[in-house]
Amino acid sequence: RRDGDLEGFMQVGGKKKGSEGRALRPVKLPHFGDAAGESYVLARVPPSSLVALYAERLSVDADKVLAADEGAIALAVGRLRELHTKGQQGGLEALDARGDLRLQELEAAQMYDERTEALQTLQQL
C-alpha cells in the first residue's frame, strides 16, 4: 500500500477453528517459544524495519501461528531456516524496485534501491 501500512495484508480473526473445534485466538505479543530445534519470537514489526522484499514466499497458516499452534510454528520455523540458509548461500535476491515491484515514482524507486544497497553493504561488514 502507498501509505506504508501493512495492516490488512494479514488478517487474523477468530473465525478459523483449531483441531479441537474451538476458534483460534491470537496470543499476546511478543510471544517467545521453541520449535523445530530453534528459539523464536512472535512480535509486531513496523514496516520501517523490513530489510528487503524477496520473490520467495512462505506459505503458513497465519491464524495458527499467531495462536501459537506448535505444528504450524514448527513448519514455519523449518521453512524460515531453509530460506535463511539459501540467503546465506546467495540464493535469495531482493526484488527490483522498478521491474519487480513496479514502483512508478522515480524518487520512491531510487530510495528503495539506495536502502537495499546500504543494507547489503552493512551485511558485508
Image (tube, rainbow, N blue to C red):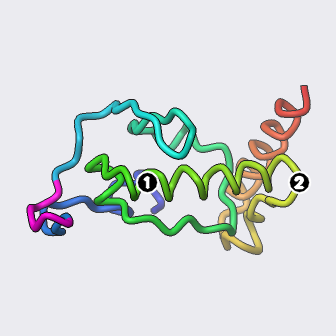
Residue 34 spot, x, y in % from top left: 46, 35
Question: Can you say whether 24 is above or below 118 in the image?
Answer: below
The residue sitting at 88% across, 51% down in the picture is: 89
Q: Residues within 10 Å of mark 2 (few under 14, many from 20)?
A: few
SS type, badge 1:
loop
49 falls in the magenta region: no
Q: Is residue 69 left or right of residue 79?
A: left
Q: Residue at x 90, y 32 (%)?
A: 124
Toward the viewer: 47 or 114?
47
Q: Residue 17's quadrant in the figure? A: bottom left
**Range drawn in magenta:** 19-24
In the rendered structure, which amino acid carries the disc numbered 2? Answer: Gly
What residue is shown with label 1? 3
Give the position of the C terminus as an image quadrant. Answer: top right
Task: Give amino acid for label 1.
Answer: Asp
**Residue underneath mark 2:** 90
Q: Tell me the chief SS of the magenta region.
A: loop
User: Of residues 108 and 54, which is closer to you in this image?
Assistant: 54
Choose mark 2 or mark 1, whichever is in front: 2
Farthest residue in the left direction?
Answer: 22
User: Alpha carbon of mark 2 to alpha carbon of mark 1: how far?
Assistant: 31 Å
Tell me if 49 is positioned left or right of 124 in this view: left
Q: Which mark is residue 57?
A: none
In the figure, 1 relative to 123: above or below? Answer: below
Please tell me which of labels 2 and 1 falls first in the chain.
1
The quadrant of the image that shows the N terminus is bottom left
Query: Which image quadrant for residue 123?
Result: top right
Task: Give how far across and how far down residue 44 sits, in percent.
Answer: 39, 38
Q: Are marks 2 and 1 in contact (CB under 8 Å)?
A: no
Residue at the (11%, 61%) spot, across then down: 23
> In screen coordinates, is 117 left or right of 58?
right
x and y, in percent, of residue 78 in the image = 59, 54
